[in-house]
Every structure is written in structure tokens, then in C-alpha cells.
Image: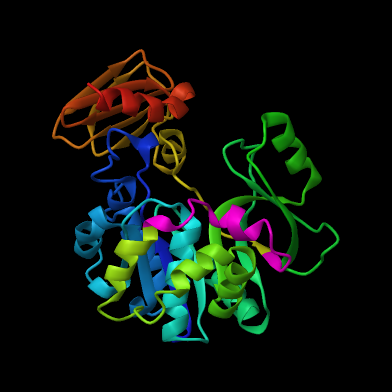
Amino acid sequence: MNKNYYAILMAGGVGSRFWPVSTTEFPKQFHDMLGSGTTLIQKTFSRLSKLIPSGNILILTNEKYNDLVLEQLPLVKPEQVLLEPAMRNTAPCILYASLKIQKQNPNAVMVVAPSDHWIEDEDEFARNLQKCFDFCQDNDALMTLGIQPTFPNTGFGYIEFDKSDTNPIKKVNQFREKPDYETAKSFLEQGNFLWNGGIFIWSAKSITAAFEKFQPQMNSLFQKGIESYNTNKEQDFITINYANAENVSIDYAIMENAKNVYVLPATFDWNDLGTWGQLHEKIDKDENNNGVINAKVVIENASNNIIRSDANKLIVVDGLHDYIIVDKEGILLIYPKSKEQDIKRITKLANEL
């Protein structure tokens, strides 16, 4: 296993569209969302460990989730968990982790990966990641793994690559914001657009140089703590200074500005498990397309529903079609799948009661 390989595992999100299972106190990455026996963060850590030494995997998360991370990932030492004292989107935490890694190993190449995505073909993922690592070791490149679009999804950003590029790794022309349906359809028809899955690969040298060039103020802020990184003074510096960083994504801060951006079209299956509907796609279904997780059910005259319960409770469903049915402690959610994007709004209303 290559000691120069590192991973930054992003585990600070709340996953509010998976309410009532996913909550601020216990977000979706720490749940066994598919009833597979492992949580999403455990599955992601295991997948990355096939290529990366477990001691080189850093977990970026909110300070309130520290105990959850250490409980669910027993191979992780406390110093591998980077605690964000404030929510500042992805750019500041990636810069912080990259500087920390670079100080430890100037020859490092790293992958930045969300902790809550689902990939079944882990061997193919490892092969794709190895190609990216090889490329970034030999080139000054900021890379991303682009996901092959299967339908005109309006919920993802897109990556447009150079159509004339016949190499397996493509030069990126530009990143495109989440489109409307007609624009998404035209992207698929053109054939040189990929979904932006938020998986990035680069060398420590390339990403820190990019921050120096495109985010000088943020870079200056985190460079001030360089002496403290990987020492017992690190957390004090972060606690005092982290909230002063701009709230900005890595896409907007770096990737949309840089000229040395490349993409490898992924050859593995992928699901970002962002909504109950996307979860429904991944689980086993009955002959009427009803998906059930951790529940005993009697289903009649019902189709295309997803049903989940954490309690030892019998759930009887009759006459419902295209619904999300979730029983969690003091909350019962019965909600149309067609309106699942509104669950985030409903969560706020429920929290006010």
C-alpha cells in the first residue's frame, strides 16, 4: 500500500432530506441507510482502505460528531478526525486538511470523497482511483471523477469536457450549475457532460498552489497555523481562526477558476443517496416496486413505496402509491415521493413545534 496516498473523508453534512431518520444530532452518514449491516461512513472508509493506508484517511466533520466517528471507525485515531468549529462549506476544510497532509508528506496525493455515497463495484472504484492517483503524481492536475449521467437530472451540477479529447482522462472545459430539465436533456444529447459527484483527486503540491493563486486571503489565514499542524496546538489555532474563513465551496473557490482541471469518466456504479427516492432505487423491491428497510409489513394494493421503520412494529399499507413511509421514534412520515425535495422545508417546520 502506497504511503503517499491520502484521503479526506467529508462527514459534516446533515442530510436533512432523509428526515426523520437523519437529524442534526445523528446525520445519515452514521446510519445504515440500506439495511446492509454497515453505516454509510463505515462503507466509505472500508472502500478507501483498499488503496489508502487507514492511518492516512482524515475525517472532516463537525465537532459535535467526533464521538460518532470514533465509535463507528475503530481504526481511526483521534488525531485523524479534523473538527470544524463552524460550518464554512468545503473549500476551507479542504485547504486545512491539505496543508496538514502536505506538512506531514510533501509527496502526498489525495482523494477528497463524501462519506455518504453508495458505490457497489468497489474494485472498479479502486481501479478508477488508481488511474487518477497515477495521473496526479506525474502532472500538475486538479482532477475529479465524473459520473456518467443516466437521465437528465436537474439536482446535480455537470462537468463539460473537451469533446475532441480522445484520452481516457479528459480536459475539463467548464463546470455547469444545476440545469433546468431542457438544459439537462441537451447536456445528455451532446455526450460530453458528466455529473459532478464531488470526488476530487490531486497532489498536495497542486491543490495548495491553487489555493495560493485563487484564494490568497483564505490561504494566508490557514498558513498562519502551519507551525501548529500535527501538534497539540493545532486544535487551539483552528478553534480561534476557522470561523474567519469565507463560506465557499471548493467548486466555486478553485475548480471553476483553474485551467489545469481534468476528469476521468467513472466506470463504476454510483448513487449519492441524496433523497428517499434515490435510496428506493438501490434497495430490493417486491413485484409492485415497494422497497422495505428494517420493517415487518403487510402490503396490499400498493406500489412504488419506500417503507422504513427502526422499531419492532408491523406496518400495514393499503392503497398507497408512490409514497415515503418512515416510522422513527416519535415521528411518522407519510409523504408523496413527488414532493420529496420539500422534506427539507418540512423538517424546519417540525423542529419549530
Q: Residue 161 falls in which quadrant of the image? A: bottom right
In this rendering, position of residue 249 left or right of residue 68: right
The residue at 32%/28% (across/down) is 347
Residue occupying the point 44% across, 27% down: 340
In depth, the one of 126 and 349 nearer the eye is 349
Residue 249 is one of the magenta-drawn residues: yes
Q: Is residue 201 above or below residue 34?
A: below
Whether residue 123 can be seen here: no
Residue 309 placed where, x, y %? 23, 33
User: Which image quadrant for residue 46?
Assistant: bottom left
Q: Residue 245: image x %, image y %?
A: 45, 57
- Specify start and end residues of the magenta stretch as a single range: 243-262
How many numbered discs, if any?
0
Color encoding of the figure: rainbow
Q: Is residue 251 left or right of residue 230?
A: right
Residue sitting farthest toward the right: 164
Asked if residue 258 is among those painted magenta in the image, a careful observer would answer yes
Q: Is residue 165 left or right of residue 232?
A: right
Instruction: Return the x and y of residue 329 as percentages of the image width and height.
Output: 16, 32
Q: Is residue 173 left or right of residue 7?
A: right
**Residue 350 visible in the current orientation:** yes
Q: Residue at x 36, y 78 (%)?
A: 229
Image quarter where the N terminus lies is bottom left
223 and 136: which one is in front?
223
Can you name the residue that lies furthest to the left here? Answer: 312
Quadrant location, the C terminus: top left
Which quarter of the picture shows residue 300?
top left
| Image location (x, y in percent) of residue 225 | 39, 74
